[in-house]
Amino acid sequence: MKPIRGTVNFVELIGWLGNDPELRYTPSGVAVAEFSIGTKRPANRNEDGSWNYDTDWIDVVAWDQLAENVATNLRKGRRVRVTGSLKTDTWEDRDGHHRKRITVRADDIIFLDTRTTLDEATVDDASV
């Protein structure tokens, strides 16, 4: 995607899928896959100086052929590298409250583990 002069909206994440991708199609037939990935970041230090880490769950949306490829080949626990841009959706719920959701619109997704690794290992939410 071509950058817009004077701004940068680029995201690169490496993490593990927290759920199987959910594939759907728009009324015009465009594929859309949604999933979340877990990434770690330093949270705070222990008394001994070692770090505690928190997991952030990031929602990712892929479109078109990338969406179909993701839905066919990825499952919960797979490790991926996602590059793309942030997208903010805003709406008003039934009670009149303003809501906001930030997602990553994926431009590229690289599968970082092999099928044999996936078949041999099980990854649960606690290990991510």
Image: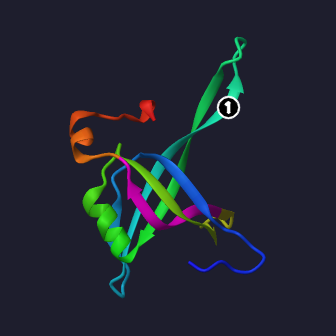
Q: Quadrant of the N terminus?
A: bottom right
Circle 1: is it few (<14), some (14-19), or many (20+) Cα within 10 Å? few
Q: Secondary structure at mark 1?
A: strand
- In the visual, does 96 lie left or right of 76? right
> Which residue appears farthest toward the top when viewing the image?
48
Please, what is the three-letter code of the amino acid marked with disc 1?
A: Ala
> In x, y percent, where is residue 93?
61, 66
Residue occupying image coordinates x 25% and y 62%: 72
- Residue at 52% in and 62% down: 83
Q: Is residue 45 magenta?
A: no
Task: Judge whether 70 appears above or below 16 on screen.
Answer: below
Q: Residue at x 26, y 39 (%)?
A: 117
Rendered location of residue 105, percent (x, y): 52, 68
The magenta stretch spans which residues? 100-112
**x and y percent of residue 15 in the render?**
47, 46
Say which quarter of the image contains residue 3. Answer: bottom right
- 13 or 123: which is nearer to us? 13
Quadrant of residue 89 in the image? bottom right
Q: Is residue 119 left or right of residue 124?
A: left
